[in-house]
Image (cartoon, grey):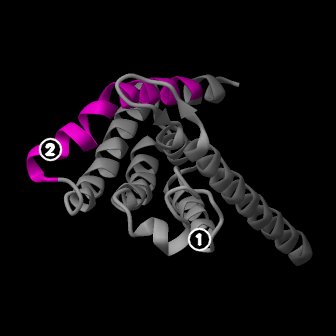
Amino acid sequence: MQLSRNHAAGNSLAMKTGLTLAAAAMIALGAKAQVPFWPVPMTLQTLAVLVIAAGLGPRLGLAAMGAYMAAGLAGLPVFAGSPERGIGLAYLAGPTTGFLIGMALAMVVTGWLAQGRGLGMRALAMLAGTVAIYVPGLIWLSAFVPADRLLAVGVAPFILGDMVKIALGALALQAFARR
């Protein structure tokens, strides 16, 4: 009987590891997937982060974000705009690092709020996660952008796209949950 328990625990660990690495790859693909949008192009990275957080929960979501960040710090060109804007630590010296920190925070906030909930609560959890991305993002960005332009540069161009991503993410998870 003990062998069965250990075998089941091993499968669970293997499953969680596989999900974490697949989710980290989704974050990287989302960072590279640019969608032409007005007034600025957007990536699908925040959509990936919010769906992963709401779908896998805070622990696996945070582990996936950690794996993604580790890959980027190791020099793999997984960050949006890399390798053109640098790789590894050089990239993290730029204006978007706060948003990456916010994505880790969003994994916890969204994952915790969305657990076992319906469509409306998942959408609200994703909205809270989006706010969690913006707060450290804007704090960090303020070192690069004058205060009077901070919201115009760091928030306004992305609000409509973020609302679309929240709706798509919540609907996708709802459809998946029904299967």
- Is 148 colored magenta in this rendering? yes
Q: Position of residue 5 (x, y in %)?
A: 83, 70
- Is 129 colored magenta in this rendering? no
The tag on residue 152 is none
Choose between 90 and 96: the one closer to the eye: 90
Horizontal side, residue 149 vs residue 155: left or right: left
Measuring 87% from the left and 77% from the top, which residue is drawn there?
2
Choose between 65 and 108: the one closer to the eye: 65
Residue 136 against residue 34 in the figure, above or below: below
Q: Which three-letter amino acid code belongs to the residue tagged 2? A: Arg
Q: Position of residue 62 (x, y in %)?
A: 51, 61
Q: Position of residue 96 (x, y in %)?
A: 38, 56
Determine the residue located farthest toward the front in the rendered image. Answer: 84
- Name the chief secondary structure element in magenta: helix
Can you identify the residue that label 1 sits on?
A: 70
The quarter of the rendered structure image containing the N terminus is: bottom right
Mark 2 is surrounded, within 10 Å at the Cα level, by few (under 14), some (14 to 19) or many (20 or more) other residues, namely few
Measuring 49% from the left and 56% from the top, which residue is drawn there?
58
Q: Which three-letter amino acid code belongs to the residue tagged 1? A: Ala
* Magenta part of the chain: 146-172
Mark 1 is surrounded, within 10 Å at the Cα level, by few (under 14), some (14 to 19) or many (20 or more) other residues, namely some
Can you identify the residue that label 2 sits on?
A: 149
For the residue labelled by badge 1, is the local secondary structure a helix, a strand or a loop?
helix
- C-alpha span from label 2 to label 1: 32 Å
Horizontal side, residue 133 vs residue 19: left or right: left
Choose between 98 and 67: the one closer to the eye: 98
The quarter of the rendered structure image containing the C terminus is: top right
Depth check, mark 2 against mark 1: the one in front is 2
Give the mark nearest the N terminus, 2 or 1: 1
